[in-house]
Amino acid sequence: MQLDFNGKKALVRVDFNVPLDKDFHITDDTRIRAAIPTIKHILSHGGAAILMSHLGRPLKKLKEDGSIDREKFTLRHVVPHLSELLGVQARFCDETVGEKATKMAAALKPGEVLLLENTRFDAGESKGDEALARQMAALGDVYVNDAFGSAHREHSSTATVAKFFGKDAKAFGFLMEAEIKNATRVLHNPERPLTAIIGGAKVSDKILLLERLIDSVNNLIIGGGMAYTFLKAQGGQVGRSLVEEDRLELALQLIDKAKSKGVNLLLPEDSVIADDFSNTAQFRSADSKEIPDGWMGLDIGEKARKAFSEVVLNSSTILWNGPMGVFEMPNFANGTKMIAETVAQATSKGAFSLVGGGDSVAAVNQMGLADKVSYVSTGGGAMLEFLEGKELPGIKAVG
Ligand code: AMP
C-alpha cells in the first residue's frame, strides 16, 4: 500500500459479510481478521479509518411488512469483535451516507475507526449508483479497497466510488494485494507441473474455469458430483449420481480439448456409492463407471484417492477448488479430507498451493490445515471469476 495516510481519513471497503448465529454472534470471523492488517497500517501511519461493508442481502430478505430487517442485517453486530481485534474501540454510524455519517466522519481523529452501516440498506449500492458513490467518496480523503470477496461486484462501494479519487488517492489493501498476487502466481508462469483439482456439485458452474485451466495446467483432477457428467459422457453407468444431461456434449468436448493440449485429465476410477443421499444410507465402493441403478456416487474411492494423491505430491503448483464428495456428511468426507492432507503434504515439500472457492476453503478450515497450505483465498465467487480470467470491477476501478 503506497498511500500516505498521515492526517488523512481513509475510506476503506472491507468485507465484513460474516456468518452470524440466531443471537447475532459471529460464527466465523475469517473475513474480519483478514482486513485487520490494512486497518492497523492506516492507524499506525497517522490516519483514521472509515470502514464500509455489506452484510447479507437485506433487500432480498425484507420483513413481512416489506421493510428492511435492520435488526438482523445491521453491521453493529460486528463492532465489539472488530474493536477487540483492533485494540481500538470502533465507533458506529447507523447510516452509510447522510448527515450523521458526514458529521461522524468529519469528527474522526487520527488513530480512530468508524464503521458505517450496511451498504446494502441502500438500493443504489448494488446498481453501482453514482450519486450514492459520490456521497461515500466525500467521507474520505483516500480510498482503499480491501474487499476481495466483493471485487466481482460492480457496486457503489466496491467500484463506482473509486472514480471520485485520483490515481494517487486510491489503493488496494493488503488482503486484496495478497489475493491478486497469489492467484496471478497460479495463472501466469507457475512453477510446473501445475495441477488443478476441481470438484463440487456442478459442471455448469465451472465451465469457464475448466476451459481456462485446460489451456494452462499439466494435470486436471476432476472429482465431486461434477465428475459423473464426464463419466456418463464417456459411456459409464453412473446410476442415480448427479448428472447434468445437458452438459454431456460439453464434457466430451472438454475431454477432447484436454487430450489435444496434452493435459493429463484424471477422473475418479472408483467411488464410494450410497443407496440414498444421506449419511445414514448404506454405502460401499464401486467402479465409477459401473454404478448400479438406484445407487449414487457421493465420494471418490480408494483407487482414485491414491491416483490423485500421487499426482498432487508430484506437483510444484496446486490449485484446489471444490470438494471431492459430499463432505458435509462424515461417511462421504474422506476423499476431500485426503485431498486436503495431500495438498498440505505437497506444500511442506515445497509446492505452492492455493485453495480457493467456498467449500474447499471450509474443508481446509474444518481440518485445521489452513496454515499448512500456501494460501487460502477469502473470495469464493470473486476468486472463481479471477481464475476464469475475467477482469473484476473492484480491481479494475483501483488498478
Ligand atoms: P460447489 O459449490 O460447486 O463447490 O459444490 C459444493 C457442493 O458439492 C457441496 O455441498 C457438496 O456436498 C456437493 N457435492 C460434492 N460431491 C458431490 C456428489 N458426488 N454428489 C452430490 N453432491 C456433491
Image: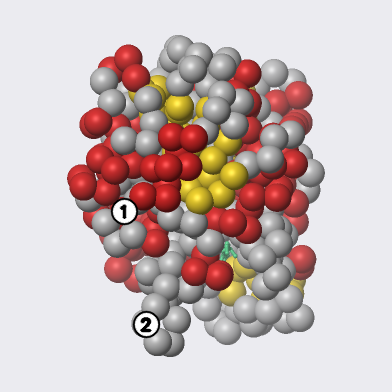
Residue lying at the far left of the rendered structure: 130
Please state the horizontal and vertical placement of residue 204, each as a whole percent of the image. 36, 59
**Is ligand 1 less than 8 Å from the beta carbon at label 1?**
no
Label 2 – label 1 distance at C-alpha: 19 Å
Q: Which mark is residue 154?
A: none
Residue 390 makes an appearance in the image: no
Q: Find residue 396 and report its image quarter.
A: top left
Q: Residue furthest bottom?
A: 64
Q: Position of residue 74 (x, y in %)?
A: 53, 61
Rendered image: mark on residue 125: 1
Q: Mark 2: which secondary structure? A: loop
Q: Residues within 10 Å of mark 2 (few under 14, many from 20)?
A: few
Q: Quadrant of ligand 1?
A: bottom right
Q: Residue at the spot x=52%, y=78% of the render?
A: 240
Q: Circle 2 sits on which residue?
A: 66
The secondary element bearing badge 1 is classed as helix
In the rendered structure, which disc, 2 or 1, sits on the residue that comes first in sequence?
A: 2
Label 1 crowd bin: few (<14), some (14–19), many (20+), radius 10 Å: many
Quadrant location, the C terminus: top left
Amino acid carrying label 2: it is Gly
Report the amino acid beneath label 1: Glu
Residue drawn at (32%, 15%) of the image: 168
Position in image of residue 192 (x %, y %): 52, 19
